[in-house]
Image (cartoon, grey):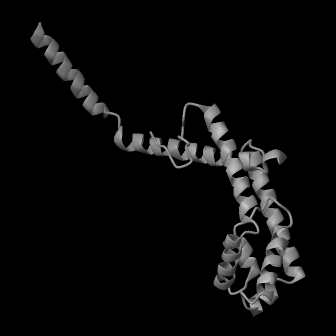
Amino acid sequence: MVYDRTGVIPGGADPVSDQQRSAEIGVEIRFFFETYAGSEEEREDIIKSYEKSKGNFSKMVKELLLFDNSKEGEVQRLRTVVVQLLKDGKVKETPKWVETSSEKGIKKLEKSMAAEREEAEQQLKEMNLSSTAGDDGLGALAALIQARNKEAHSSMVDDLEARYCKPKSAKRGREDEKEGTKNKKRRN
């Protein structure tokens, strides 16, 4: 039996406990975002991502920073944090920062993030899952992850069966029948 750190057993027989665990994961994720946003840890992560991306705000948002994309205004909030870090002298302004953090750049980035949210919502609908306002889509995300885990587990089992549980060949089956007939004759 496989058991991971989330407490989920892929292909587990109890869908009620799987659903309950999904709800618990959703609560944990929301709590994390609530405590992480605006924290000293987030500021340190923003400084590191600013330095790594040489101030490319678009790259920071799309590839390096951790934030709740389901909330509108997060991109602007992150920009405000970087502006404050610049004022405090924690990071230095770069040409990439000037280029990617303009109002036009921010609007383009927010539009891109909104398109990602819509695409994710569409994929959830195609999989007969939906996000609800009450859980910020986290329950649906957890269900999606569980569905993928279940598919992966099923696929793995099918691959193992195909590899190690090969059926006897027709020739071998006929030989077994002949030997069975010979053994019957000897017994009689």
Direction from residue 110 to residue 48 in the image, left or right: left
Q: Quadrant of the N terminus?
A: top left
Q: In the depicted view, which residue is nearer to us: 172 or 158?
A: 158
111 lies above or below 88: above
Q: Residue at x 71, y 78 (%)?
A: 59
Q: Residue at x 75, y 55 (%)?
A: 120
54 lies above or below 14: below
52 lies above or below 28: below
Quarter of the rendering containing residue 109: bottom right
Direction from residue 19 to residue 151 in the image, left or right: left
Residue 141: tell me if it is visible: no
Q: Quadrant of the C terminus?
A: top left
Q: In the depicted view, which residue is nearer to us: 162 or 7?
A: 7
Q: Residue furthest top?
A: 188
Quarter of the rendering containing residue 66: bottom right
Q: Residue at x 55, y 43 (%)?
A: 7
Q: In the depicted view, which residue is nearer to us: 28 or 166?
A: 28
Direction from residue 101 to residue 31 in the image, left or right: left
Q: In the depicted view, which residue is nearer to us: 85 or 143?
A: 85
The x, y position of residue 94, in whole percent, is 74, 92
Residue 91: tell me if it is visible: yes
The x, y position of residue 44, in whole percent, is 67, 76
The x, y position of residue 180, in whole percent, is 20, 19
Q: Residue at x 46, y 43 (%)?
A: 2
